[in-house]
Every structure is written in C-alpha cells, then in structure tokens.
C-alpha cells in the first residue's frame, strides 16, 4: 500500500490539504471528537500521572534491555509453537512473508490493521506476487477500495466523510447508496465474512508482545483482529522489535492507557492474546504461526539520542491535539506515520534527506507532550532533529543567508537599533511587498520597542 | 471489595459497555433468562460441557453443532473482570473461541466466583495462557466512518451476560 515517500513535499502537500474544505471539515470533526472523548475517559482515572510514569518506566526498561527481552520472547514463543523470524529491513520482511505464503500455495490472505505492514509496503509486494490481500478493518477496507493510504494510525479513513464512503461502496460493491454508518457497516460485515471463511492465511500486526509468555497482544474493536488470528490455519504476525513488554503483569497499565488515549474507551471491545499454535485438545488457534520481528532502522534509533521515540505505543493522541496535523491531515506528511510522533519517527527511520521539511511541521506548543501516555519528550526530540537538519546541511541558501543577517543584526546593538527604525519607517512598503507572506501578517513595529521600555 | 460489590461493579461496567447484564438465582431462572434472550426457533450453539451450560439450554428447540451457522452462542466463560465489565473466553477444555465471535448474538454465563475485581487479579490467574484468550467488553463496534459508533462489524452485535451464584 505504501506509496513513494513524499515527505520532502510537505509544504506543497499541506497547501493542497488546506485547500480541500471537505478534508478540513472531516479532520476538525474527528480530532475534536477524539479530544473530548479522551478527556472524558481519563476523568475516571484517579492516578493518571502515576500511571503514565509507570508506563514510561516499563517501556524504557524494555528499550534498555531490548536484546535480552527479544531473546526471551523468541524462546518462549518458539516453545509455544510459533516460528519467530528477525527481519533486518523492509525488503527482507516482505520477501520472507511472500515466500511463506507462496510455499503454502496461499491465494488469498485476510489482513488485520498493521501500521508496520504499511511502513514496509507489504500489500503491494504480495499483490505483485499474485496473492490477494483483503484488508478487514473497516477503515483500512475503505481506503483499500479507494486505493489510498491511511491518514491516521487509529482511524485510517479519518479524512473521508460518510457521503464519500457511501458513494465508494455503491460504486465498488454494487450496493444501494446509503450514508448511514450502521448500514455501511452491515454491508462490510457481509462482504468480509465470506472473505474470512475463504482466506488461506491471516496477516496481522500486534500492539504488544510479551517476553515472559511469548504471547502477542492485539487491541481491536471490530473483531477482525480475532478473525485473522484464529480462523485461518496459517497466521503471520508482523511487528517491530520494540513492541515488547516484560510480562503479562505489565498489561493492565497499558490496557488502562492505550484505548483511553486512542479512542477514549475504557478498554477496546477485544483484547486478544495469542500464544503459539493450537495445542492438543484445543479446538481453535492457528496451526502454523510465524512471527516476524522487524528492525528496519530501530536498532540505530535505539543507539542514538532520540531513542525515547521507541517508547511509542501508537495511540495517536499526539496527532489529535496537534495544531499542524489537525489542519493539514495525515497524507501531507508523505509517509506512514503522521502527526508529532510521525514527524519524528519518519525522520529517524527514513533519514533527513527524505524527510527534512517535517522537522519544521510543529509549533512546539507541547500539546503532544501533555497527552503522551508514555511521556515521550516530543518537543525535545523535534528540537534535536531541527539541530540535526542544520548540521547535516538541509537548509536552503535563502534560509542560510537570512539567518546570517539576523545573527549579525541581533549581535550588534547599533545595527539592531537602525534596522528597527528603518523597518518602522518603511513598514507600509514592507507590508505591500510581502503580500500574503509571513511578514505581511506581522503586527506593525511599536514606536517604543520592548527593550527601550525596560528600566 | 466483597463478592457482592465485585458483582455489582461488574454488572454496572458491562452495561456501560453496551452489554446486557442480568443476575439469576438458580438454574431454573437461568433457563428462563436464556429462553427470553434467544429468538424463537433460531439456531443456537452451546457446547454443553458444564452443568450450567446444560441447564441453560434445556428446552431450546433448535440447537446446532456448528457455531458458524448459529444465530446465537450460549456458553459459560472462563472469567469476568469487574474493573472493565469484561468477560474472558479462551481455548480451554476443547472450547472454540470463535463461538463467541461468529454468531451475531453472544450469551455468556459467568458464575459470580469467576469474576475478578481487577485486571491485575485476572492476569495473575493466567499463569500459562492457552493459545487463544479473548477479553471481551461489549459488542463488536467501529467508529471508522466519521467516528460514528456502529455496532456488529465482524463480531456479535449483541452481548448478553448472565451472572449465576
């Protein structure tokens, strides 16, 4: 599914998004609703701050001892009957999954929502290999029908309104037009039920993996996650290496935080634990389970100054409160992960050259830091990346020149004084020349500047 | 918390999550409650592995062996969790976890002594987890279209919980 990365065109992408009034209305509706629901859900939690501290500590503990936890998880999942694979990069993960499916003659796979699979572009790879992949999460199904990518990590079709979905279903599925979400949901249930029962394999992501028990944990609301992980005989799960938790005893903390942060629910409809394959005497469970642990740049992030980004549990709370995301939507960021977590992770995973405009896609207001359930210092990370953007040379000659002048002017009181006077004198001209640029929207310089009002 | 308090919190939270929650005093009341919930003549799946299950479906006319074609599943579940109003289904004792997923109506029977007060207590009881464990809270739902709640996407559109002594 993942298209060419267009993060470098963030400015142009944003301008296009801002011009799309139905997108902006959909984004405002969705992010406002999310915000209200999240606040209400946390109202009922007595020790929220202590809970966030605990979650942050547990995640940090996992990162500090990641190789050991990975080893433990691999051993325990293997003894429960799973095959655990390590994939160094996107290409090797895709090839591995493709060959597992090919070797077993799989024609159609039912897939649950997985951002990691979007990150590596799994669907496109499998389809090129002749394997039909059916997205079964309603939001993912909608964007798959439309040929789009997700614009939010929790609600992939957040940018679409009910009329658009109604028309899409009428066009593609040949059903009567309806814009009632309940009716559209029923249609999807019917279409997808047949797919589930016919699928030769299930592909899923995982929210967490438990080192101590070798279990995968999935949080879902629709039930498709339960379907793809237990109905087909073959189940392939892909997750990135940092998704580990030490033990089942750590889960309650994350059950209390993740759904509340993501959708404002006290818990999702389903929290599924999958531990290995079907054992003697059991009536359900996949007969073959492959777990693909994807690195794809995580080890490098872990060794660097931005390692705290890997604490992320993908709740999406940071994007719902971000003034930039709320305005431009997810597609403008040009890759899999949008919003504050996305701008940091995208830059770290794909490199500065492919993504440098993203590091400026923040007002540094800190709303993301206020809501992050695992206390990722997103503003600090953004500032570090901004520093890195300059030191790695990704700035335009205009920016360099401007900064050199600005630096010289503020260092020298005489120049600063005269610049100030001159700019006030010629303010109407400057305004006229600037037009709609930033300077055109600045307030007029005061006749008595701040520094001269100080005693 | 006393047992009564745990059950009360469980029932309240389950109802908040849009599950039906009822409490019965004995087997006869259980049978009546199930008969009221099941639509007349519709196919019902029940593994009938426990005394409670056998009591619950006594007298139901249309029972089927395959949960995939059933309209409703009636089963005793592994546990309840009061904190979240959840029930827990697991692949233990030859049970199929999909029985609680495929039919559009899930009727779960949970004896009050199987209800844990908190998530911590439940996970402490799960020393070596079976292949599939599903913590279920309310019906299947989605908000993928304009964040508007819709019920019954892939799983049941209706969940009823009956607490027995």
Image: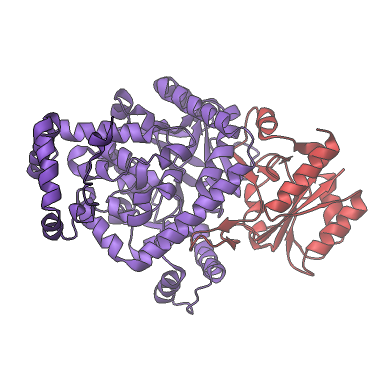
Residue closer to the observer: B85 or B110: B85
Colour of chain A as rendered: purple
Q: Is residue A177 left or right of residue B132?
A: left
Among the chains pictured, the one given red colouring is B
| Vertical comparison of A91 with A181: above or below | above
Residue under the image location 47 percent in, 45 percent down: A235
Figure disc tally: 0
Q: Is residue B36 left or right of residue B47?
A: right
Task: Tell me where residue B42 appears, x and y as whole percent.
Answer: 74, 68
* Residue farthest along the front direction in this orientation: A455
Please state, as top left, top right, bottom left or bottom right, where the N terminus of chain A lies in the image: bottom left
Residue under the image location 27 percent in, 31 percent down: A384
| The image quarter in which residue A375 lies | top left
Please state, as top left, top right, bottom left or bottom right, where the C terminus of chain A lies in the image: top left
Q: Would you say residue A270 is visible in this rendering?
A: yes
Task: Tell me where residue A118 appears, x and y as whole percent.
Answer: 35, 48
Q: Would you say residue A296 is visible in this rendering?
A: no
Residue under the image location 58 percent in, 38 percent down: A255
Task: Tell me where residue A250 appears, x and y as whole percent.
Answer: 57, 29
């Amino acid at each position: 599914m993942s298209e060419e990365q267009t993060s470098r065109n963030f400015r142009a992408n944003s301008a296009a998004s801002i011009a799309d009034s139905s997108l902006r209305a959909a984004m405002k509706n969705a992010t406002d609703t999310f915000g209200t629901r999240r606040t209400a859900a946390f109202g009922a939690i007595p020790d929220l701050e202590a809970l966030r501290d605990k979650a942050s500590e547990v995640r940090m503990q996992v990162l500090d001892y990641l190789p050991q936890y990975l080893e433990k998880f691999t051993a325990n999942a293997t003894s429960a009957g799973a095959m655990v694979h390590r994939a160094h990069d996107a290409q090797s993960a895709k090839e591995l999954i493709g060959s597992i499916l090919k070797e077993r003659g799989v024609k159609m796979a039912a897939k649950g929502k997985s951002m990691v699979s979007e990150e590596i572009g799994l669907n496109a790879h499998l389809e090129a290999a002749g394997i039909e992949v059916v997205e079964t999460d309603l939001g993912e199904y909608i964007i798959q029908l439309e040929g789009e990518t997700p614009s939010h990590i929790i609600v992939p079709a957040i940018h679409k309104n009910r009329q658009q979905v109604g028309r899409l279903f009428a066009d593609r599925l040949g059903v009567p037009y309806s814009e009632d979400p309940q009716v559209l949901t029923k249609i999807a249930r019917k279409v997808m039920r047949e797919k589930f029962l016919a699928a030769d394999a299930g592909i899923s992501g995982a929210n967490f993996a438990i080192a101590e028990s070798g279990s995968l944990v999935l949080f879902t609301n629709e039930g498709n996650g339960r379907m793809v992980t237990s109905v087909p005989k073959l189940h392939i799960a892909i997750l990135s290496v940092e998704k580990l938790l030490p033990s089942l005893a750590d889960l309650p903390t994350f059950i209390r935080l993740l759904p509340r942060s993501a959708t404002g629910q006290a818990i999702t409809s389903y929290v599924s634990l999958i531990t290995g394959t079907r054992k003697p005497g059991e009536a359900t469970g996949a007969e073959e389970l492959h777990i693909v642990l994807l690195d794809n740049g995580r080890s490098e992030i872990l060794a660097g100054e931005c390692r705290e980004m890997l604490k992320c549990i993908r709740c999406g709370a940071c994007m719902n409160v971000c003034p930039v995301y709320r305005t431009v939507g997810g597609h403008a960021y040009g890759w899999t992960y949008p919003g504050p977590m996305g701008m940091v992770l995208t830059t770290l995973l794909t490199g500065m050259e492919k993504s440098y405009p993203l590091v400026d896609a923040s007002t540094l207001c800190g709303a993301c830091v206020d809501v992050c359930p695992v206390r990722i210092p997103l503003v600090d990370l953004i500032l570090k990346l901004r520093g890195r953007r300059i030191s790695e040379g990704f700035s335009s000659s205009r920016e360099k020149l401007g900064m050199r002048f600005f630096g010289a002017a503020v260092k020298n009181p005489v120049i600063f004084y005269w610049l100030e006077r001159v700019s006030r004198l010629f303010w109407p001209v400057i305004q006229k020349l600037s037009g709609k640029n930033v300077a055109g929207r600045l307030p007029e310089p005061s006749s008595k500047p701040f520094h001269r009002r100080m005693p | 918390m006393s047992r009564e308090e745990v059950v009360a919190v469980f029932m309240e939270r389950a109802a908040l999550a849009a599950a039906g929650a009822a409490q019965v005093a004995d087997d006869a009341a259980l049978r009546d409650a199930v008969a009221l919930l099941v639509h007349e003549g519709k196919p019902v799946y029940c593994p009938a592995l426990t005394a409670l299950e056998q009591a619950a479906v006594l007298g139901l006319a249309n029972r089927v062996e395959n949960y995939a074609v059933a309209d409703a599943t009636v089963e005793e579940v592994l546990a309840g969790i009061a904190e979240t109003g959840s029930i827990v289904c697991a692949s233990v004792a030859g049970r199929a976890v999909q029985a609680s997923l495929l039919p559009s109506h899930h009727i779960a029977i949970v004896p009050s002594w199987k209800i844990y007060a908190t998530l911590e207590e439940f996970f402490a009881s799960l020393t070596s987890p079976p292949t599939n464990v599903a913590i279920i809270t309310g019906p299947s739902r989605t908000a993928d279209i304009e964040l508007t709640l819709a019920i019954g996407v892939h799983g049941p559109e209706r969940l009823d919980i009956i607490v027995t002594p």
